[in-house]
Image (spheres, rainbow, N blue to C red):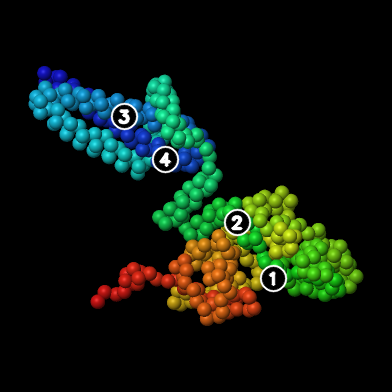
Amino acid sequence: MTSTIILTSLAILTLIVLSAFFSGSETALTAASRARMHALEHRGEARARAVNRLLDSRERLIGSLLLGNNLVNILASALATSLFLGLFGEAGVALATLVMTVLVLVFAEVLPKTYAINNADRMALFVAPLLRWLVRIFGPVTLTIEAIVRLILRLLGANVERRIDEAAAHEEIRGAIDLHAREGAVVREHRHMLGGVLDLNDLEVSDVMVHRTNIEALNADDAPDKLVAQALAGAYSRLPLWRDTADNIVGVLHVKTLLRAIQAAGGKTDALDVVALATAPWFVPDTTSLQDQLSAFLKRKAHFAIVVDEYGEVMGLITLEDILEEIVGDISDEHDIDVAGVLPQPDGSVKVDGTVPIRDLNRAMDWSLPDDEATTIAGLVIHEARLIPEPGQAFTFHGFRFEVTGREKNRITGLHVRRVETPKQRRVRKPAA
């Protein structure tokens, strides 16, 4: 009798250990980082390859784990009921239910799953080789169960086909970046760079181009001496050439090409044919995504393009540097002119030029103002106010107060922006009496 009790107890404990293995394995494989597993597989890690193969057939894996878990739990409960009936009679049923509930809940569910969720990658790598054999053994049963489940779901109208959603994948990556940034694993600059790469498909050329009002261009009808002087005095290495009107771009002049021509002419500039030195302009639609434009720049080995709207009117220009700055931030060199566009104030507010892009302001101040409906901070104010405000007018939206400090004709030239505290934030900041 005693030996039977000991053997039954050992069998129950063994089954609880197996139940813990199944529960922990399910949690570990569900929470394991797919990106890290793929990286380890590329490095030649065999266990990571096993993890990826298991996750590729997730339904079969979950079916095998649930099948194994239910088998051992039911068997353990049956043995415990039989054991307690022999020891305590009819009361043994209730006692076995209570004891097994506690044992299974603590040791076969909460404990292994808590460990697995905190050590998901390590545990997934450890259990993957064993689970591959388990999936093979339970294969015929799980295939049958999977077919029944799919049939029931189809009858209920649920879509069970796996599809790769690019937008969802991007959002998952973006969410992971933001999460790690909040936890301190990713610094702010790196978060902006990684997010900038993901934004290339969401942004259009018109969002980052240099607007036509800010283009530094040359009149092709000017005298060669004047064109050379303007080109050398400018801050850019490539300059558009226009004739008759600013919309009629006839070429793009590279300053290096101009300097070579001046050297070949012995320093004489009065006889230079500057227009002949220019390359043909490249026109691109303003609705082109930054990802497509970047690919086009790389394919053409070009750095400069003129942006036009659907009617062929010149909207601005875009360079390879403009796109790269969306990823790495502002790129400046010794020839760049530093224009004060964002001026933080001691009280935490900011004085901003109206032409400052919203994305640049967000990046500089670590804010999250929306840029879906407008490109510049002035455009955002006009969009929200539904009018062109006068100096002195102020508006509050998106948790900020925008005061107009300057306007020229129909353009907002200056704004004073400060964050608006909620009543709850003011109570938190208020010192205790």
First of labels 1, 3 by sequence position: 3
Looking at the rendered image, the disc whose residue lies closer to the viewer, 3 or 2, is: 2
Residue 129 in sight here = no
Q: Amino acid at mark 4?
A: Ala
Q: Nearer the viewer, residue 81 or 188?
A: 81
* Residue 250, quarter of the rendered image: bottom right
Looking at the rendered image, the disc whose residue lies closer to the viewer, 1 or 3, is: 1
What quarter of the picture does the C terminus occupy? bottom left
| Residue neighbourhood size for the residue with mark 4, other residues' Cα within 10 Å, grouped as few (<14), some (14–19), many (≥20) | many
| Residue neighbourhood size for the residue with mark 1, other residues' Cα within 10 Å, grouped as few (<14), some (14–19), many (≥20) | few
Labelled disc at residue 213: 1
| Residue neighbourhood size for the residue with mark 3, other residues' Cα within 10 Å, grouped as few (<14), some (14–19), many (≥20) | many
Q: Amino acid at mark 3?
A: Asn
Looking at the rendered image, the disc whose residue lies closer to the viewer, 4 or 2, is: 2
**Which residue is the site of mark 4?**
32
**Which residue is the site of mark 3?**
69
Q: Gap between marks 3 and 2, in whole Å? A: 49 Å
First of labels 4, 1 by sequence position: 4
| Residue neighbourhood size for the residue with mark 2, other residues' Cα within 10 Å, grouped as few (<14), some (14–19), many (≥20) | some
**Which residue is the site of mark 2?**
203
Q: Residue at x 38, y 40 (%)?
A: 120
What secondary structure is found at the residue carrying circle 4? loop
Q: Residue at x 50, y 46 (%)?
A: 168
